[in-house]
Image: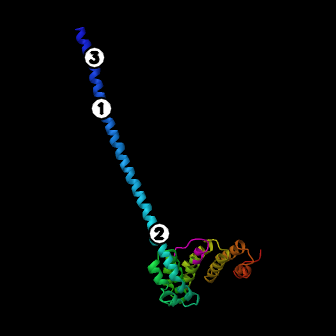
Amino acid sequence: MAKRKTNQTEELPVAYVEEVKSSGGNALASLWDNLKHRQDIFMYVLGGLALLVLGWWGYKVLIVEPQQKDAVNAMWQAQRAFERDSFRLALENPGGGYDGFLGIIDKYGSSKAGNLAKYYAGICYLQLGEFDNAIKYLEDFDADGDLLPIMKYGALGDAYSEKADYDKALKMYEKASNSGNHPQLAAHYLKKLGMLYEYRGNKEAALAAYERLRRDFADQSIPEWREIERYIYRAGGGNQ
């Protein structure tokens, strides 16, 4: 009986070890399959990112840059008409077989030059008295930098003012005076802001705009600053 018991005792660990080896092998195989699956996903992600980068590069080199070059070449005749105050011709047919600003927008609107053509078109319509069209193109114009945002919002203020939409005009002049970094233009539209408030009978707001101009744009080279004292006086303020 003792011998039989010893044999059973020796056999049990052998069976147990075989079971552990078997289950361990399955676990390792499962882990390997999992790692391989994750590696496949990782490679797919890398491949997708590479396609995105190549797609962006191709769009930039094959589409955007050629469009920008073509748009710049096309714009010079329209700009010449604009400089001569031939605003309708600048919009539609500047001559020489060249597109006006509207044609340039249609063909190259996604380029930087095409975007700038929207500003030109807005100013042309503003000068022609077509204020809704002016607002449309100025709103579409993507302005950045120190100068262009002031020019955009200031021109929108002029367009809304011409339409007698004074609340929107005031907002645009306010934006113009707070945008970009060009003291001369900012002071110009800040003065317009004060004048429009004054025209609407809000002398307190007008005075605040004039006093801000005097305080924040103290520069002899700025015409609006040199004459601001009389506007302050007219709005009910005095020398301080």
Mark with earlier residue (1, 3): 3
Q: Which residue is mark 1?
A: 23
Earlier residue among tags 1 and 2? 1
Disc 3 secondary structure class: helix
Judge whether residue 25 is colored magenta.
no
- Measured as percent of width and height from the top left, residue 61 is found at 47, 69
Q: CA–CA distance between discs 3 and 2?
A: 76 Å
Q: Amino acid at mark 1?
A: Ser
**Mark 1 touching mark 2, by CB under 8 A?**
no
Per the image, is 143 magenta?
Answer: yes
Quarter holding residue 217? bottom right
Q: Nearer the viewer, residue 37 or 141?
A: 37
Residue interval drawn in magenta: 141-151
Using the rendered image of the protein, determine whether residue 43 is visible from the camera's viewpoint: yes
Asked which quadrant contains residue 19, the reply is top left
The chief SS type of the magenta part is: loop
The percent position of residue 20, horizontal first and vertical second, equals: 30, 28
Question: Which residue has dot 2 on it?
Answer: 61
Circle 3 sits on which residue? Answer: 10
Along the viewing direction, whichever of 156 and 171 lies nearer the viewer: 156
Depth check, mark 1 against mark 2: the one in front is 2
Image quarter (top left, top right, bottom left or bottom right) of the C terminus: bottom right
Colour approach in the figure: rainbow
Amino acid tagged 3: Glu
Q: Dot 3: few (<14), some (14–19), or many (≥20) neighbours within 10 Å?
A: few
